[in-house]
Amino acid sequence: MRGRLHATVLIAAALTGALLAPSAPARAAAGDGTPGDPGIDFVGRWNTTNASAYVPYWAGAYLRVGFTGRTVKLKQRNTVDLWASIDGRPFTAFKGSGTINLTPTALAAGNHTLIVSYRQVAGSYTGDAVFQGLILDGGATTFKAPARPRLVEFIGDSITAGTTSSQLAVTGYGFRTGERLGHHHTQIAIGGMCLSETADGCWAHETRYWMASGGQAGTAAWDFSRYTADAVVINLGTNDRGHGVGGPDFQARYTAFLTRIRARFPNARLFAMRTFAGRYAAETQAAVRVRNAAGDAAVFYVDTTGWLPPDGLSDSVHPNDKGHQAITDRLAPVIGARL
């Protein structure tokens, strides 16, 4: 859990040649499958400064698109691991470079929906997460997939990033919960992250959440006009204790973090989760109460006590697939009831 993945953003940013603030996508012809195609939804934080190559940041960013025809392929630059789902089927793992065929067995003719999520570039993993377009059948086109009504943002550390689950972010509780609810979703998470910036260098959301790529101090600020979250789910504190953050300090920082999130998303529902290990549970709940007392009634404490089954962990901290599914089963109704 404490393994901080320090290479994350420098690698991802280098894929586009410079640490630049991501700009709004350049629009291409509708239906052509290029990165600027308005039929493609890029969900999460993407660098779109290069019109021919879009790069996802953080964990769990994905693209979603409808397409016609019987086959679909990805145009990649260099080798990368990714997961793809067509027409709501389970995600399938792919690895390769250049042209990656997502339909080795042709589909039935008609309309289809595709979701692609790249493995997060972090730590020792240096895959080339660069989307360069789709290749469709002759005469086929893309189209907007059925609209999703809301967006839920999940903020956390390696647990939220899906570390140790079978498909990482894709089998993490954030991705699964968003899919269960039928909403768009993001996972703003990197392994080893704290809430608090500490003297010994814990990467902290209180400073790095606001950045486009997040893991390196001094990189470009994220343009929050790119999307608006309808709900924000925070799961932080598991790592802070190991970096010497005291309870009162943690509570004050959590309260300040909630206040800043509220300023960015005035109408969102904010959910502060008890860490699954129970660290800083009282302080997290107290921070929510402070915000409620200040007049913000749309901030909620989520008590996760007993959510993880005895066989729901892959080690002493990280949920396995069964654990992430158990969290999803409990969390999705909590969020759904408030949206």
Image: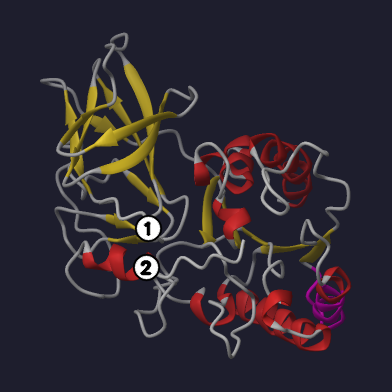
Q: Which residues are magenta?
A: 286-297
Q: Residues within 10 Å of mark 2 (few under 14, many from 20)?
A: some
Q: Position of residue 317 (x, y in %)?
A: 71, 54
> Residue 7's mark?
2
Q: Could you tell me which residue is drawn at 59 percent across and 85 percent down?
A: 197
Find residue 57 and report its image quarter.
bottom left
Please give left or right for residue 266 compared with residue 333 in the image.
left
Mark 1, secondary structure of its residue: loop
Q: Earlier in the sequence, mark 2 or mark 1?
A: 2
Q: Is residue 96 above or below residue 62?
A: above
Mark 2, secondary structure of its residue: loop
Q: Residues within 10 Å of mark 1 (few under 14, many from 20)?
A: few
Q: Could you tell me which residue is drawn at 24 percent across and 19 percent down?
A: 71
Q: Quadrant of the N terminus?
A: bottom right
Please give left or right for residue 330 compared with residue 207 in the image.
right
Q: Nearer the viewer, mark 2 or mark 1?
A: 1
Mark 2 is on which residue type?
Answer: Ala
Q: Position of residue 149 (x, y in %)?
A: 55, 45
Proximity of marks 2 and 1: CB atoms separated by less than 8 Å: yes
Which residue is labeled 1 in the image? Answer: 124
Outermost residue to the top: 108
Find residue 277 and report its image quarter.
bottom right
Disc 2 and disc 1: Cα gap in Å? 8 Å
Q: Could you tell me which residue is drawn at 38 percent across and 28 percent down?
A: 113
Q: Could you tell me which residue is drawn at 32 percent across and 8 percent down?
A: 108
